[in-house]
Image (cartoon, grey):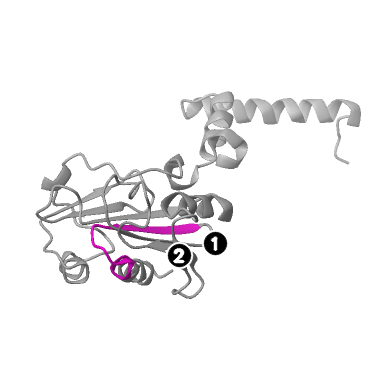
Amino acid sequence: MRSSLPSAIAAPVIGAVLLLTGCSTAMEDGISATEEISAEAASDPLADPATEPVADSGLPVNALPEIPGGRSSTDQCPYLDNTWVAETNGQITTGTGIDLRFDTPACVFWSYPEDPQLTVIIREMPDRQSAIEVVDWAAPIDYTEPAEEIEGWSGGRAGAGMVPEGLPTGQDGALYAVQKDNRAVVVFSNQDQSLKAELVAREVINNLGW
């Protein structure tokens, strides 16, 4: 018959053996048990709410693209072709810049004028209300008409001169801004007709598969 430790003694002894074995393995790997736990917590965003990723880089709803190279930039927009933009907005494209601070890069297109001919901002916000706030900023309800042309998307549109203070970009022109769920698509064009901005928004939504 096999001998056994009394149950009152066996549990602590076994626990101590397991603890020593775990510590030995951790030390052999060059890290302490405490460091292992810290590493696991750091790799799991759910371990600490403060580490949860912020949607769309945490930029405010009124964030505009910042292009370090300005009109001399040649970075290709990932969802709009230069030739298509030139044909749709009616101006040759002389420069293209992207702002990677946005989860989906914002794109700015220039032609011969000093100001951009086209600015496209894509936002993936934490929730639907935040996306609506982006559209409310870009297309203030007091000065714009409803934009319901793209199925499932809604927002506002305005031709040149409709918004008294001008576009948020600081120039004159047309705008088209729409939202669906937590996503918003904003287009500012230096052209007079909001139809051109709408066509750009349609192309963006289609190319992104939204």
- Secondary structure at badge 1 equals loop
Q: What residue is shown at x 18% (from left), y 48% (from top)?
A: 115
Find disc 1 in the rendering and name its residue.
181
Could you tell me the amino acid type at mark 2? Glu
Q: CA distance from mark 1 to mark 2?
A: 20 Å
Q: Residues within 10 Å of mark 2 (few under 14, many from 20)?
A: some
Identify the magenta region.
Answer: 183-197
The quarter of the picture where residue 88 lies is bottom left
Asked if one can make out residue 3 in the rendered structure from this viewpoint, the answer is yes
Could you tell me the amino acid type at mark 1? Asp
Q: In this picture, is 28 found above or below 117?
A: above
Q: What residue is shown at x 32% (from left), y 56% (from top)?
A: 161
Q: Which mark is residue 145?
A: 2
Check the picture and name the quadrant holding the C terminus: bottom left
Q: Which mark is residue 96?
A: none
Front residue of 164/130: it is 164
- Secondary structure at badge 2 equals strand
Q: Residues within 10 Å of mark 1 (few under 14, many from 20)?
A: some
Indicate left or right for 22 with 136 as reference.
right
